[in-house]
Image: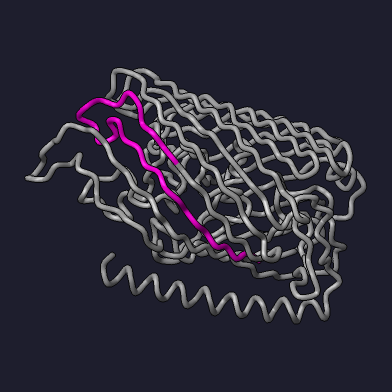
């Protein structure tokens, strides 16, 4: 990291601390005046608040809390939850610090470029990774209408502060009109630059500094996460819901070269029922399609980078340029059609989550599509009033990368657990092992693997 980047990181970290203090003071003052709710939203996965760790007041309606009360929440809830009491402004933040103890090796044939063997792995050892931090600004601007803004104060790929997304969520009519009031009992509209709602895994993944909703440390190998500009329309009736969306198809807004771009179209159908206090079942299916794009990022949109630093990277690797160590990036930058099915079952303290996915697409220089498949199964068991949990995940992805003539396979095993000291504080650890199969002998990933332990401490409010 150069001196400028290090200075940016220090400034961002100091700003995060200052904002966290301001937010804490603001929350204390609000608790004395506001009519919001501090209840755990009847979440059977959340650890209880105590007299020594009281829950922060929730002042925004249709809102997923940033702390453990947001566990197992997927789409923002339709029920208001908080009575409307005029304009409200709420600050929040999330911080994560990691300790990494991973080792890696490969059997690739040496390839010399500029006097360097680009297949020689960089030396890595035990140590702390730079902290990640998010800043949240949420505002209730009218009854059932709120604004959300998320900024990354520091991340692996960017040490400087930058905006992740911002959008308007409309769950009620801004005008008192009977027809609109009745319509908005069933529909929700989201417009802006937002994290697209493809699949359910993006609700359970680590999002830079926000790691509290992920029971483990890594995200999926093919990390379907990106932000795009557009609109989503939801319809909900009892336990069923559907979503249709249109976006610009890229992570950035652009008006040049229109002949090389087309909108992205998305759809989602789902069923989510709380059969009893002990049993919940959910099943969703999602589809995403873009016909042409200069730089589609459905599987390359995590600008914060992966959770495993420098694994299977060459000796000349830098933290920012190789920010996605361990990820599988299929390279569908020009065209992609993807679908995913996600089942979720929670019975008492046991949670089971699955991911069955297929994506087909290509880069601009290719003339035919390639296909990738991904499967993941995750189990979590929470106990001791949800303060402790054990978790495991198996994830495998297979397909053909650009420039290759045969399919390759990558699989990952994670096993670990966590401890919620309070609903705002969490410590977790895992053992991870990842292997690469069928890669060519002249590829750095030939017979490659990494394994070891990861430890994270997270604060979120």
* Residue reaching furthest to the right: 178
438 or 103: nearer the viewer: 103
Q: Which residues are magenta?
A: 433-461
Is 231 situated left or right of 104 in this image? Answer: right
Residue 2 in the image: state x and y as whole percent: 26, 67
| Number of numbered discs on residues | 0
Residue 278 in the image: state x and y as whole percent: 85, 42
Residue found 55% across the figure and 51% down from its top: 206
Is residue 454 highlighted in magenta?
A: yes
Residue found 86% across the figure and 71% down from its top: 35
User: Taking the image as drawn, is residue 333 in sight?
Assistant: no
Is residue 53 highlighted in magenta?
A: no
* Residue reaching furthest to the left: 115
Residue 68 in the image: state x and y as whole percent: 70, 58
User: Taking the image as drawn, is residue 72 in sight?
Assistant: yes
Is 293 situated left or right of 177 in this image? Answer: left
Is 293 situated left or right of 320 in this image? Answer: right
Residue found 57% across the figure and 66% down from its top: 135
From the viewer's perspective, is residue 314 above or below residue 80? above
Which quarter of the rendered picture does the N terminus lie within? Answer: bottom left
Residue found 40% across the figure and 21% down from its top: 370
């Amino acid at each position: 990291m150069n001196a400028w980047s290090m200075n940016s990181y220090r400034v961002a970290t100091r700003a995060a601390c200052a904002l966290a203090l301001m937010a804490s003071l603001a929350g204390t003052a609000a608790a004395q005046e506001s009519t919001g709710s501090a209840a755990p939203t009847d979440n059977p996965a959340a650890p209880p608040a105590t007299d020594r760790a009281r829950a922060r007041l929730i002042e925004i309606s249709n809102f997923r809390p940033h702390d453990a009360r947001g566990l197992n929440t997927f789409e923002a809830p339709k029920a208001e939850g908080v009575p409307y009491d005029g304009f409200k402004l709420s600050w929040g933040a999330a911080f994560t610090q990691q300790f990494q103890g991973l080792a890696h090796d490969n059997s690739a044939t040496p390839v010399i470029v500029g006097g360097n063997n680009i297949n020689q792995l960089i030396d890595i050892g035990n140590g702390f990774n730079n902290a990640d931090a998010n800043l949240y600004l949420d505002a209730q601007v009218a009854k059932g209408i709120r604004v959300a803004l998320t900024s990354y104060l520091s991340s692996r790929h960017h040490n400087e502060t930058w905006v992740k997304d911002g959008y308007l969520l409309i769950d009620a009519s801004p005008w008192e009109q009977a027809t609109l009031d009745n319509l908005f009992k069933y529909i929700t509209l989201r417009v802006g630059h937002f994290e697209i709602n493809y699949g359910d895994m993006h609700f359970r993944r680590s999002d830079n500094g926000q790691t509290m909703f992920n029971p483990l440390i890594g995200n999926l190998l093919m990390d379907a996460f990106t932000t795009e500009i557009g609109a989503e329309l939801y319809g909900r009736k009892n336990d069923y819901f559907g979503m249709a969306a249109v976006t610009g198809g890229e992570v950035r807004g652009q008006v040049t070269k229109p002949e090389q771009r087309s909108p992205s179209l998305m759809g989602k159908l789902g069923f989510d029922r709380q059969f009893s206090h002990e049993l919940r079942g959910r099943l969703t299916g999602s589809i995403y399609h873009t016909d042409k794009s200069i730089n589609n990022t459905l599987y390359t949109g995590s600008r914060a980078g992966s959770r495993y630093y420098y694994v299977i990277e060459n000796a000349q690797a830098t933290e920012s340029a190789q920010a996605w160590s361990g990820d599988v990036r299929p390279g569908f930058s020009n065209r992609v059609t993807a679908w995913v099915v996600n089942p979720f079952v929670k019975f008492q303290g046991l949670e089971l989550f699955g991911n069955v996915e297929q994506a087909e697409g290509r880069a601009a220089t290719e003339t035919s599509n390639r296909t990738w498949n991904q499967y993941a199964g995750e189990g979590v068991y929470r106990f001791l009033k949800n303060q402790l949990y054990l978790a495991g995940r198996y994830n495998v992805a297979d397909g053909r990368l650009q420039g290759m003539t045969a399919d390759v396979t990558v699989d990952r095993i994670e096993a670990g657990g966590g401890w919620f000291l309070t609903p705002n504080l969490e410590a977790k650890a895992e053992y991870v092992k990842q292997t690469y199969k069928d890669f060519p002998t002249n590829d750095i990933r030939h017979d490659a693997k990494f394994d070891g332990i990861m430890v994270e401490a997270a604060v979120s409010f």
